[in-house]
Image: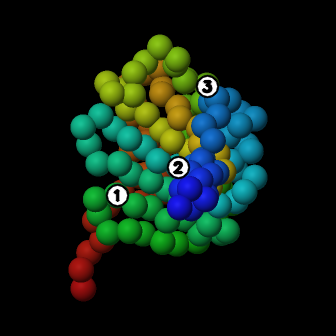
Amino acid sequence: MQKVIMFLIILLVTACARTLEPNADNVNKIFASKDFTFEFHPVNKTTKSLSFRSDYLVYKSNHPTIRREISYDEVLLINDFIQKIVNLHSNTLDLDTSSYYVIKNTAYKVVIVPDQEDIYFDALLKTLDLDRPIEKK
């Protein structure tokens, strides 16, 4: 019984993504996997996420999930957006009272708390034509 419990503890510890400091090198380490998720956690609102798997983008929100191919120009736009929020990161703000971002894959996780009110994520979603209800046919 002790061996089973010890095995489960080791499995749990190794299965959790390791949290890294929010800097360009660590974000690039996550991007290198080409299989990662970018989440936005607004204060008192629904979490939205963009996941990237190979050449596909998956957008999850309170609207139906959208899956589609992603273009090179869209990749550049998203990378530029993430670089801007990494540069705005603040160590003094609290996750309970501020909007924040999480960039993660199975091995690593970076939490970014921007130093100013977030308006950029909605603009990014509009540019990518993602944050809209899908019309029923």
Residue 98 lies in quadrant: top left
Mark with earlier residue (1, 3): 1
At which x and y percent is residue 35? 65, 61
Q: Residue at x 43, y 34 (%)?
A: 100
Q: Residue furthest bottom?
A: 137
Is label 2 in a helix, a strand or a loop? Answer: strand
Residue located 62% across and 66% down the image: 53
User: To which residue does mark 2 refer?
Assistant: 38
Circle on res. 61:
1
Q: CA distance from mark 1 to mark 3?
A: 25 Å
Q: CA distance from mark 2 to mark 1?
A: 12 Å
Looking at the rendered structure, the kind of residue marked 1 is: Ser
Which mark sits nearer the N-terminus, 2 or 1?
2
What whole-number distance in Å separates the C-alpha atoms at marks 2 and 3?
16 Å
Q: Is residue 3 above or below residue 38?
A: below
Secondary element type, mark 1: loop
Q: Position of residue 60 (x, y in %)?
A: 40, 61
* Secondary element at tag 3: helix
Which numbered dot is residue 18? none
Q: Judge the density around disc 2: few (<14), some (14-19), many (≥20) Cα neighbours within 10 Å.
A: some
Asked if residue 71 shows in the view, the reply is yes
Q: Is residue 85 left or right of residue 73?
A: left
Q: Identify the residue at image location x=40%, y=21%.
A: 94
Please determine whether, in this image, residue 37 is positioned above or below residue 66: above
Q: Give the class, few, some or many, for how many residues have Cα within 10 Å of label 1's Cα (few <14, many ≥20).
A: some
Which label was assigned to residue 87?
Answer: 3
Depth check, front residue: 20 or 78: 20
The amino acid type of the residue labelled 3 equals Asn
Residue type, numbered disc 2: Phe
